[in-house]
Amino acid sequence: MSPQSSEPGSPASPNAPWPGAPAWSTLPPAARAAWWLLPVCFLLWLYRDGLSAWFIADDFAWLSLLRLVHLRHDLLHEMFAPMAQGTIRPWSERGYFLVLEALFGLDSLPFRIVAFATAAADVLLIAWLTLRATGSRIAGFAAPILWIANSALVRTMTWSSAYNELLCPLFLLSALAFYIRYLETGRRALWWSQVAVFVIGFGALEINVVYPAIAAAWVIFGVQSEPKQRNRRLLGLVPLAGISIAYFVLHRLAAPLPATGAYALHFDSSIFKTLALYWKWTLAPEATRGLGHRHILVVNTFLIASSLALVWFVVRESSSGRLLPLFCLTWFAATLAPVLPLADHRSDYYLTIPAIGIAMLVGAALGQLITASWLYRASVVLAVSVYLWAMLPVTLSDTHWWLLKSLQVRTLVLGVQSARASHPGKAIAVDSVTADQYNFSFADAAFSANGFNDVYLTPESGLNVDPRADPAIRDTVTLAPDVISHAISHNEVVVYSLESDHLRNITEGYARRLSGRLSDRLTVGLAASVRLPTRVDVGNILYSWLLGPTWLPPESGIRWMPGSATLRLGVPENGGSRLELEGYCPEAQLLAASRHLMVLVDGAVVGETRIYDPESNFRRLFPMSGLLAGREFVDLEIRVDPVNRKDGQDYGLVFGKVAVLP
């Protein structure tokens, strides 16, 4: 394998001369520098609001890792144990958050700087690869610009949890760059550098598994070689394919594919619908509805016309012996394929990596402007202009929208942190929280990174939550009117209102507002007009007044009971038909013996069940029809047998929620 020219301006053995490919060496040094830097500057300008974006949604799960490492003293587990739908991404998620949080705390700017630096490296590699493939500096300049403009990058450039979508292409592009240089020079060090980058890339994102297909596509479509040489090169990629297969098998053994939920895989006709949708989002912004009906018509017309034009361009180039467009399409298809079965979780930011292939394809078309006919020039320039006209406003507005939402979450989280410092030992209830603010904070345990487990919504804020939200989370963080009234009267909670840029203490005003509507719960009153909460979060200290004396103290949102414990529950106005119990039993205890659970009302057994290994988390429903008729509240006794005894204390079961359902 003889070394070939390594001059950046010459194609890496193109399979046919690419038209309009002026020599790189003809550019002065200043122009060369501008050629590299202007796309990076465009990235910084377009996503400038992303630099100021704060943490949001899933970010808080990763920000909690540092606290878990300190609690469990098990860094390896937190770095490599399957999490979040069975994913194992130690570099792009666990390491990214652990290292930066350890160094900078909840300062989001270092996270954003790392993300932008990674995106800038992607931009430079896309430019290098396109220039290498076409020899056209126009193509090499245009490809990263087109990729940057795509609105699919908005969430990637504003949301720290999407950093994996930036880090993965860095590994894919770097490995391919090493491989291309290896093909040009024959230096084995470059081959092994490719292998090392490829293997490390598995820690960024599972899509890294498709790299051997991308490298094979480069051998077939990207470089000129005799059939025997091509076959030899393809055979040399077999070990890489073996690594991908081994990774897939080991990953599936460690983290089986989810069978239900949003991340369940569907290998049926829905794949084609998903593919069509992602193709549409690649060429036109997902949020076209915000452009108005006239603009939508233009965008849809452009979508059809541009799709046909790209097909024509690929066919024309292939018939002329220039197969690079097929490599670009292979990149798009290979990197998109792993997410096509996710029919229940379609998201435009999944296009961050596949869109590179289409950007290179259109860049190649632009690279022929110098030698093409006036009709070709006009058509390509018009198509690219419409693409930028549709994409850029959406990209700018969506980036600003994500910034504003993240700053609202910042106000909430840091405001609660300040409130806790001012009111140590008290719970915090937040009023005036919108549905979006809930979805990006409370729904993802936004306060757990600081170790706060007693931050709640007022009943009024709870009404703002989307009814489709996970009821287990919504009900846990929303205080019932009776509970917050009792907590205020006993000085157990402070109430804050979420204003535009700060939290304001409204405890006194909120108490006066409640006094006109709710009775004071200094005791568990027996008046006929009293209605107690129909749901008790046993591990929440604010519900302690409804629990009997035998319950153990709460621990991180849960509470142990001994062999027997009592509690009082309200009954819904239209009566109660079922009793719901949710709890947990450590597997070590279940291995010793299953647990017999029994519920009594007025001393009479109304339900009993057994809890078996490995069913450590349990949920039980007991019919209560007729038993609660005419009652305002009910006193329950829960018994469990056997119990474990440790340090003179009996431990039966752990409880989270007990509720009377209508």
Image (cartoon, rainbow, N blue to C red):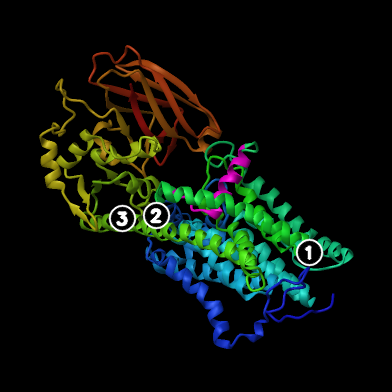
Q: Nearer the viewer, residue 634 or 171?
A: 171
Determine which residue is flagged by label 3: 408
Would residue 659 be found to the left or right of residue 520 on screen? right
> Start and end of the magenta stretch?
270-288
What numbered label is drawn on residue 321?
1
Mark 2 and mark 1 in contact (Cβ < 8 Å)? no
Instruction: Mark 3: give few (<14), some (14-19) or many (20+) Cα within 10 Å.
Output: many
> What residue is drawn where x is 66% and y is 45%?
253
Task: Kindly state the secondary structure of the residue where label 1 is placed.
Answer: loop
Q: What kind of residue is marked 2?
A: Ile
| Circle nearer the N terminus (1, 2) | 2
Q: What kind of residue is marked 3?
A: Gln
Task: Kindly state the secondary structure of the residue where label 3 is placed.
Answer: helix
Q: Position of residue 365 (x, y in %)?
A: 64, 65
Residue 617 seen: yes
Q: Is residue 272 magenta?
A: yes
Q: What kind of residue is marked 1?
A: Gly
> What residue is drawn where x is 56% and y is 69%?
123
Would residue 616 be found to the left or right of residue 227 on screen? left
Q: Is residue 122 above or below residue 162?
A: below
| Circle nearer the N terminus (3, 2) | 2
User: How many numbered circles are shown?
Assistant: 3
What numbered label is drawn on residue 389?
none
Q: Is residue 4 above or below residue 153?
A: below
Q: Position of residue 641 (x, y in %)?
A: 44, 26
Distance between the alpha carbons at the discs numbered 1 and 2: 49 Å
Disc 1 versus disc 2: nearer the observer:
1
Distance between the alpha carbons at the discs numbered 3 and 2: 10 Å
Instruction: Mark 2: give few (<14), some (14-19) or many (20+) Cα within 10 Å.
Output: many
